[in-house]
Image (cartoon, coloured by chain):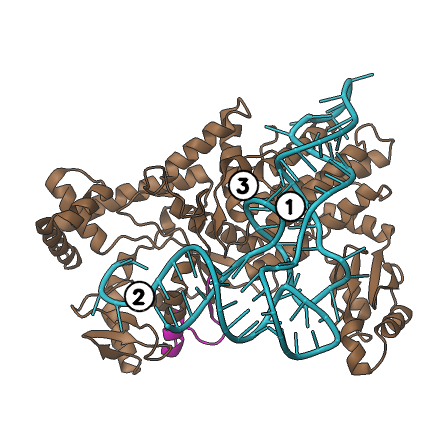
Chain colours: A brown, B cyan
RNA sequence: GCGCUCGUAGCUCAGUGGAUAGAGCAACGGACUUCUAAUCCGUCGGUCGUUGGUUCGAAUCCAACCGGGCGCGCCA
């Protein structure tokens, strides 16, 4: 359901660009007359009056000129009621599947198999999973790609350390690498052994990677993230094609030698290079990314690539995409997009770290979330759902391109734009529906202003989802759900449901049912659970 | 030095060139023999970093400056 589109359709032929949008002054407004005033050399209010006079809004809305030349639209209560009735009977809640399904590859999470998951993995994992869920629900064919860091220097360090000592701590291996020159040299030789296929080294590598994958999958399950074993696409898997990628780029004249390294300069020699072969002949992550991209657009093949990676990598991806385009690996109609996100900051406004200055481990962060949520409920399953929901919601509810401040008290607050507030609203709805027994959608009537405001918002789910699918701005979905929950709470206070007279009772139960289903669906698309009781 | 990004209420944040810039938190004042008060209603709170420019109209677009964060050749 899209009331903006219905209104716009009635205005075609009168206005080229109806510019219909929600308005605090009416249900919807159009500012088109203001823009046309100059072209038509008329007063905006005169043009707006003409639009009102000529538009055929019969059976949909009323219109009036307002302010400096806006046309304000008020949807008729009968239309709102009929639309809500229809959406309540629609399994897809008024949101159709896309008419142009694409094969979308979403590259997300991407932990390093040599290391533990930290708070730094929260955003790429949580945002990526929400993007996947949204696009899948809208009917796209989504490929999850977990670009596991399972190759390179860090593994040389870790394998050498574990062979020497039996200890598989990356942190201690790293410390030794930084302080022990002899160990450092051996670790670097170990990288060469790994990449040349030394059997003993490979055995250790496989063992370590397998262990890490198991740990990661445990964490995903705990977080309610949909990544599975089959979604791992490690950097190592692109190893066989790196030389070929460089050869192809060379043949296309895209590389120059610079200080012994082979580089692409997609933005000119006065900008940073993309190093595709190091001066020692080795390959770095730029080459792996190019090989992965080529595989993804040529072999899978995907038509939309989404890289859910932190904002500091912006320049890197701009260069990778530019080189790939020049090489013909991103033909017309195939889009690559860096879905960038900001950092998580501590209360001091700097990168979020533990008191000791180390990265906060993800498992410990979730433990603390569960402990804090446990003060709100005695049911461990509910505490886990509230804890994970609060953490994820906090991450998804602010514009992902910006940084955000991690604050336990705020994210677990029971009121405000938080996970627990939405889960509570859902639980209250569940409670009403349980008391009512079997509820089937009935005809909706709109009388009380609180009902009207709720219905208007319920009907906005489709434009919100369409917008989110394009911009991947998940905070627009959280903002919508919070507004919906708040409007429901007002409705809940003002409009008795179970005690309402016959007829009204069925209508209000239908509004509860529909609100609950949209909250549940919306939160599910964000990867957040909705317990029936809190 | 070059580049990217952010700067909006005391705090945390929305804001798609359009009307009097909105929420939540905090503060203050109200509403529970309830459909879950984990809630709701109300009040208070703004030089939209600064200065110019474009425009009928700028928080939004452009330029310069100030301030924060981040990146910039062989880690990933």
Q: Which chain carries label 1?
A: A
Q: Point out the tag, 3 or 1, that comes first from the N-terminus.
A: 1
In terms of secondary structure, where does tag 3 sit?
loop
As drawn, B33 above or below A155: above
Q: Point out the tag, 2 or 1, that comes first from the N-terminus.
A: 2
Of residues A169 and A232, the one nearer the viewer is A169
Residue that carries the numbered disc 1 in the rendered image: A481
Q: Is residue A23 left or right of residue A395?
A: right
Residue that carries the numbered disc 2 in the rendered image: A286
Residue that carries the numbered disc 3 in the rendered image: A528
Q: Is residue A75 left or right of residue A255?
A: right
State which mark lies toward you, 2 or 3.
Answer: 2
Q: Point out the tag, 2 or 3, that comes first from the N-terminus.
A: 2
Residue A241 occupies which quadrant of the picture?
Answer: bottom left
**Span shown in magenta:** A321-340
In terms of secondary structure, where does tag 1 sit?
helix
In magenta segment, residue A493: no
State whether discs 3 and 1 lie on one chain. Answer: yes
Position in image of residue A199 (x %, y %): 12, 51
Q: Mark 3 lies on which chain?
A: A
Other-residue count near label 2 (Cα within 10 Å), few / some / many at <14 / 14–19 / ≥20: some
Q: Residue at x 50, y 43 (%)?
A: A392
In magenta segment, residue A335: yes
Position in image of residue A500 (x %, y %): 84, 31
Q: Is residue A300 left or right of residue A532?
A: left
């Amino acid at each position: 359901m899209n009331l903006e589109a219905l209104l716009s359709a009635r205005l075609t032929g009168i206005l080229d660009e109806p510019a219909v949008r929600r308005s605090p002054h009416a249900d919807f407004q159009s500012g088109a007359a203001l823009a046309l005033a100059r072209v038509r050399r008329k007063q905006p209010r005169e043009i707006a009056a003409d639009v009102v006079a000529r538009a055929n809004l019969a059976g949909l809305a009323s219109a009036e000129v307002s302010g400096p030349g806006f046309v304000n639209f008020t949807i008729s209560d009968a239309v709102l009621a009929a639309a809500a009735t229809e959406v309540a009977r629609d399994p897809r809640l008024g949101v159709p599947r896309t008419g142009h399904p694409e094969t979308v590859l979403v590259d997300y999470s991407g932990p390093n198999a040599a290391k533990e998951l930290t708070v730094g993995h929260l955003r790429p994992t949580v945002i990526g999973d929400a993007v996947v869920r949204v696009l899948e629900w809208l009917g796209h064919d989504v490929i999850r790609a977990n670009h596991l860091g399972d190759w390179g220097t860090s593994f040389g360090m870790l394998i050498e350390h574990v062979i020497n000592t039996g200890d598989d701590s990356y942190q201690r291996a790293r410390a030794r690498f930084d302080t022990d020159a002899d160990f450092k040299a051996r670790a670097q030789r170990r990288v060469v052994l790994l990449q040349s296929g030394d059997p003993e080294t490979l055995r250790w590598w496989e063992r370590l990677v397998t262990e890490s994958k198991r740990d990661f999958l445990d964490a995903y399950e705990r977080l309610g993230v949909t990544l599975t074993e089959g979604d791992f696409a490690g950097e190592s898997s692109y190893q066989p094609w790196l030389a070929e990628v460089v050869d192809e780029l060379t043949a296309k004249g895209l590389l120059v030698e610079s200080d012994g390294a082979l580089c692409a300069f997609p933005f000119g020699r006065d900008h940073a290079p993309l190093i595709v072969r190091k001066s020692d002949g080795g390959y770095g992550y730029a080459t792996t990314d190019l090989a992965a991209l080529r595989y993804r657009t040529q072999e899978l093949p995907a038509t939309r690539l989404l890289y859910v990676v932190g904002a500091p990598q912006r320049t890197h991806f701009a260069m990778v995409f530019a080189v790939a385009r020049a090489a013909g690996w991103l033909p017309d109609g195939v889009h690559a997009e860096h879905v960038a996100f900001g950092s998580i900051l501590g209360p001091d406004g700097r990168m979020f770290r533990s008191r000791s200055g180390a990265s906060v481990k993800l498992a410990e962060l979730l433990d603390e979330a569960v402990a804090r949520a446990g003060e709100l409920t005695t049911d461990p399953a509910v505490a886990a759902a509230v804890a994970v929901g609060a953490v994820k919601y906090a991450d998804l509810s602010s514009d992902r391109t910006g940084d955000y401040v991690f604050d336990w008290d705020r994210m677990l607050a029971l009121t405000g734009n938080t996970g627990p507030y939405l889960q509570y609203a859902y639980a209250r709805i569940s409670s009403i529906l349980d008391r009512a027994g079997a509820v089937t959608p009935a005809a909706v009537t709109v009388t009380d202003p609180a009902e009207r405001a709720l219905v208007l918002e319920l009907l906005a789910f489709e434009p919100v989802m369409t917008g989110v699918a394009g911009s991947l701005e998940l905070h627009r979905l959280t903002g919508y759900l919070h507004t919906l929950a708040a409007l429901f709470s007002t409705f809940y206070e003002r409009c008795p449901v179970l005690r309402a007279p016959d007829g009204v009772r069925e209508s209000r139960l239908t509004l509860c049912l529909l609100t609950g289903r949209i909250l549940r669906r919306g939160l599910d698309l964000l990867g957040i659970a909705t317990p029936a009781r809190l």
